[in-house]
Amino acid sequence: MRELETTEEELAKLGERALELALEYWSSVEDRPAVPKVSGKATQDLFSEPWPHEPVGADVLDEFREIAAHARPSGGRFFGYVFGSGEPVGALGELLAAALNQNAGAWRSAPSAVAIERTVVQWLANAVGCDGFAGSLCGGGSAGNLIALTMAREAKMPANEAGARPCTIYTSDQVHMSVPKAIAMLGIGRTNLRLVPCDENFRMRVDALESVISEDRLAGNTPIAIIATAGTVNVGAIDPLTEIATIAKREKLWLHVDGAYGGLAALAVPEKFRGLELADSLTLDAHKWLYQPVECGCVLYRDPSIARKTFSQTGDYVRTFSEDPVEGFAFFEETFELSRRFRALKLWMSLRYHGRHAFQQAILRDLTHARILAERIRSNPTLELLTPVELSAVCFRHRYQDNAALLRRVLARSRVYLSNATVNGQFALRACFVNHRTREEDVISIVSEIEAAASDLDL
Ligand SMILES: *Cc1c(COP(=O)(O)O)cnc(C)c1O
């Protein structure tokens, strides 16, 4: 055998073992502590050995148990951040995608992978009412926002040749941090991102948006884009999309919608997302509310020629590699990556395996879980619900405890995983439901865990 080659028998053994370990993990995920008992030092000690000169062999797979024991499990009692639950058929898709090792940069290098990616992008566009939009899969919402805002800049204030010029962009004060990060990377500068105040439901105030834009115009500044959010990361608010789109149109501004958290819920509750189809670009995150293993972001745009103008290196985008519109297609001319993983296979397999109805039902169940929790909080005199529940994020606090200490105690008890948010300047406990494993008793256990943690603190 030459180095790096594996015999078929050996590979069969390894494959069987790997699958066994994955199954063992999935079947034990609900029994694992919601917060792993780990320390920085323990993980450092376990996982910082030098690269061995001699082969370790099949033992590398057995180390998976240790790795899993020091991982934060994706079980039904995980309610932190906005993080999907890693649907196992999608995970098998990941394995098979890696086995094929396609470069999904262009049809030439990955015919089936590129065809499948273009199809799943159409599915996602259709799911959110944006039929006809083009797009691509990317690492996540941060990459999607960066790609879309680069297109906005190139459409309205071209910078590819001579560099960025001063311009202003508008979003609400509930914006996700990936947006100011993108604005910084684009050379527009964070001070040129105007944070428009929100109403009491954390939705961008349209009157305030209009006045900030006109102030900027009066001051001689150049507005280029508005970023609305469909599902703010803290509380799940949806900006008034139709009204914002009207302003964008009148002012000739690019409209991007950050739907990384909420957008895909349009599959189940389209009435909440009217106006999404008026956007020029849209970010979705299938590793959030479509339960896929990370990474699985998606950026959609109305006009693919702007994506090509933005990301084609030479201007050669007009000249295709082939006269055939399918065979000449290259994702690398519509995004910044050249070599790209076959991200679409997990979606293709998971979405078809379960069917569209199952995903709608799972999203509806998440929405119901959020309402159940909100109801339990409202009827509990020691707890206070801090925001309306529009989607599946629930922000609340204990009236009589130090809530940061309470959260630390809840996590130390390891039965549920909550995170926190700042709501109106106040520290809030936060539970977010984008989890196909969660059961109603898991939801109810949030309140009992808060109560138990509070009595622990009182001791
Ligand atoms: C999660 C999130 C993002 C970033 O997405 P990643 O996949 O974590 O990069 C952007 N915007 C919103 C509203 C989000 O919730």
Image (tube, rainbow, N blue to C red):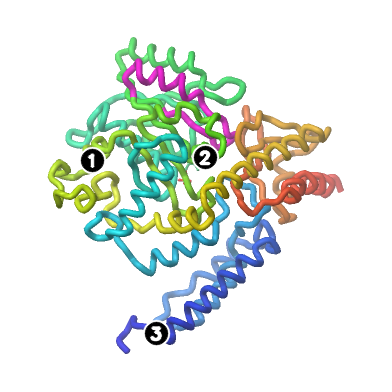
Label 1 vs label 2: CA separation?
28 Å
Amino acid type, callout 3: Glu
Q: Residues within 10 Å of mark 3 (few under 14, many from 20)?
A: few
Q: Residue furthest right?
A: 459
Q: Nearer the viewer, mark 1 or mark 2?
A: 2
Label 1 vs label 3: CA separation?
43 Å
Q: Nearer the viewer, residue 161 or 7?
A: 7
Q: Residues within 10 Å of mark 2 (few under 14, many from 20)?
A: many
| Pointers 1 and 2 in contact (C-beta within 8 Å) | no
**Residue 313, percent across and down?**
18, 45
Which residue appears at 42% of the width and 15% of the height?
212
> Which badge, 3 or 2, is on the more N-terminal residue?
3
Judge whether residue 85 is colored magenta: no
Q: Is residue 22 above or below residue 438?
A: below
Q: Nearer the viewer, residue 448 or 364?
A: 364
> Which badge, 1 or 2, is on the more N-terminal residue?
2
**Residue 50, percent across and down?**
44, 75
- For numbered disc 1, what is the local secondary structure? helix
Q: Which residue is mark 3?
A: 8
Q: Residue furthest top?
A: 218
Q: Is residue 309 left or right of residue 392?
A: left
Q: Which residue is mark 1?
A: 308
Q: Quarter of the image holding residue 104?
A: bottom left
Amino acid type, callout 1: Arg
Q: Is residue 50 above or below residue 445?
A: below
**Residue 324, percent across and down?**
18, 50
Q: Which span of residues is magenta-colored?
A: 227-253
Q: Quarter of the image holding residue 144?
A: top left
Q: Which residue is mark 2?
A: 267
- For numbered disc 2, what is the local secondary structure? helix
